[in-house]
Image: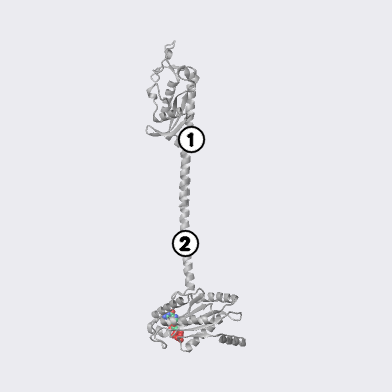
């Protein structure tokens, strides 16, 4: 959008520039015309006018009131005197027929009514009286736009012969030069067509780039979403929405290393549903799935500290990794057991309760090089086995002594 906007602004500026060039060309042509006419008038005035043969197109000038205006040559030809004003009129008619460029000698009080100034010329003449030396503008003439140029006519010595009431330098009127706009436009038309073409190419290029960018962006977004969902599928259990075993493996490794570096305790709680096979058998597999979903919700709710990590380890086995000591992890395990029991999910075929219950095994160690997260998980699993053995719906903890014993046994084996 910005691209198109800038392109539009540039187009407007360039078109304005081209139009301005057209104006400058027109006004310099106007000035040239004016100067030519003034030169011709001086030449005429310097010779006190020139005699030409009287014809239908060149009758004697009725506004020229001098005795020797008309003469007859010895061979009988009738001649009439052409003064600068008459010459200007005739040249204007010729030029208009040839090129439609008009020049008009006029004043605020012309002798000849046809020389009367039009509105634009009148305001230009008034401006000259105010001291303006030139007036130029685009104005309508006979319903057509024209570049109009006007300069004042000043009395020179040669003018005084006919215009005796004036002094040298007086403004006696002016000559306007009017050039049809259509005569100048071709000068800039080529430039304009280049401008239009260039901007059309730039705009289409911009639109094309925009489309390419848009589709690339959409493609990247799609790929990103696909990659994210692949990653999600790889690390999140689709039934419960909890991290899966793969996620657990990566997480516990990192946590173990961190706890090893900073020497703080790390606990694992392993838990599974009591007699879940019976549950599936009586309630059906879909109800079993629902039960797992409900259990996941409770686990998430009660393990919401930032360093509690809950995952579905596999089947109906879940696991909590938490950076807390033996006492705290035992308390958390007990809370989980209690919460699930209180959730009162019916389990009619359970020998321990009418409701779904959990067995949980807890193990805590401060990591050291001779141990590993796998061994810690093994201790939690052993504690879970104990909980099952000791009647289910209970928490068992693999205490420090049991851990030390297990370690000693391993060393002895080696
Ligand atoms: N509905 C459902 N059942 C599952 C899923 N994953 C594992 N199970 C079931 O969980 C049951 C686990 O049974 P067992 O290992 O015998 O254990 P249990 O019946 O819970 O007995 P204890 O653990 O000794 O109390 C099996 O019947 C599995 O089919 C699952 O995603 N959905």
Ligand 1 visible in quadrant: bottom left
Label 1, label 2: how far apart the Cα atoms are: 53 Å
Q: Position of residue 71 (x, y in %)?
A: 42, 12
Residue 130 falls in image quadrant: top left
Q: Secondary structure at mark 1?
A: helix
Mark 1 or 2: the one toward you: 1
- Tell me: residue 75, above or below residue 393: above
Q: Residue at x 48, y 65 (%)?
A: 224
Q: Position of residue 103 (x, y in %)?
A: 43, 27
Which residue in the protein does label 1 denote?
A: 24
For marks 1 and 2, the one nearer the N-term is 1
Circle on res. 219: 2
Q: Residue at x 46, y 66 (%)?
A: 225
Circle on res. 32: none
At label 2, counting other C-alpha atoms closer than 10 Å, the crowd grade (few under 14, some 14-19, many 20 or more) is few
Residue 92 falls in image quadrant: top left
């Amino acid at each position: 959008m910005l691209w198109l906007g800038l392109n539009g602004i540039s187009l407007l500026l360039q078109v304005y520039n081209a139009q301005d060039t057209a104006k400058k060309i027109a006004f310099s042509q106007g000035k040239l015309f004016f100067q030519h006419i003034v030169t011709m008038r001086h030449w005429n005035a310097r010779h006190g006018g020139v005699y030409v043969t009287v014809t239908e197109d060149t009758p004697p000038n009725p506004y020229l009131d001098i005795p020797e205006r008309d003469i007859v040559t010895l061979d009988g030809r009738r001649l009439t005197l052409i003064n600068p004003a008459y010459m200007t009129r005739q040249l204007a008619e010729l030029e208009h027929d040839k090129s439609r460029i008009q020049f008009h000698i006029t004043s605020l009080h012309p002798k000849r009514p046809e020389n009367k100034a039009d509105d634009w010329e009148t305001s230009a003449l008034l401006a000259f009286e105010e001291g303006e030396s030139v007036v130029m503008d685009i104005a309508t003439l006979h319903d057509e736009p024209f570049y109009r140029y006007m300069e004042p006519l000043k009395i020179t010595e040669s003018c005084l012969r006919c215009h005796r009431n004036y002094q040298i330098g007086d403004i006696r009127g002016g000559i306007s030069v009017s050039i049809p706009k259509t005569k100048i436009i071709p000068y800039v038309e080529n430039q304009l067509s280049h401008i239009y073409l260039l901007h059309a190419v730039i705009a289409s290029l911009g639109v094309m780039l925009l489309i390419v960018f848009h589709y690339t962006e959409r493609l990247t977004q799609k790929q990103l979403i696909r990659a994210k969902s692949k990653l999600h599928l790889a690390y999140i259990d689709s039934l419960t929405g909890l991290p899966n075993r793969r996620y657990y493996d990566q997480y516990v490794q990192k946590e173990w290393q961190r706890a090893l570096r900073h020497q703080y305790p790390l606990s694992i709680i392993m838990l599974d549903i009591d007699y879940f096979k019976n549950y599936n058998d009586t309630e059906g597999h879909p109800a079993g799935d629902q039960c797992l979903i409900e259990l996941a919700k409770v686990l998430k709710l009660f393990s919401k500290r930032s360093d509690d990590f809950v995952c579905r380890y596999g089947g109906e086995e879940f696991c909590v990794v938490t950076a807390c000591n033996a006492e705290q992890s035992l308390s958390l395990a007990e809370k989980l057991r209690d919460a699930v029991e209180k959730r009162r999910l019916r389990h009619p075929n359970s020998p321990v309760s009418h409701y779904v219950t959990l067995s949980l095994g807890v193990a805590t160690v401060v990591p050291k090089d001779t141990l590993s997260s796998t061994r810690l998980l093994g201790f939690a699993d052993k504690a879970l086995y104990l909980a099952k053995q000791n009647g289910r719906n209970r928490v068992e903890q693999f205490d420090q002594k049991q851990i030390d014993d297990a370690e000693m046994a391993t060393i002895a084996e080696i």
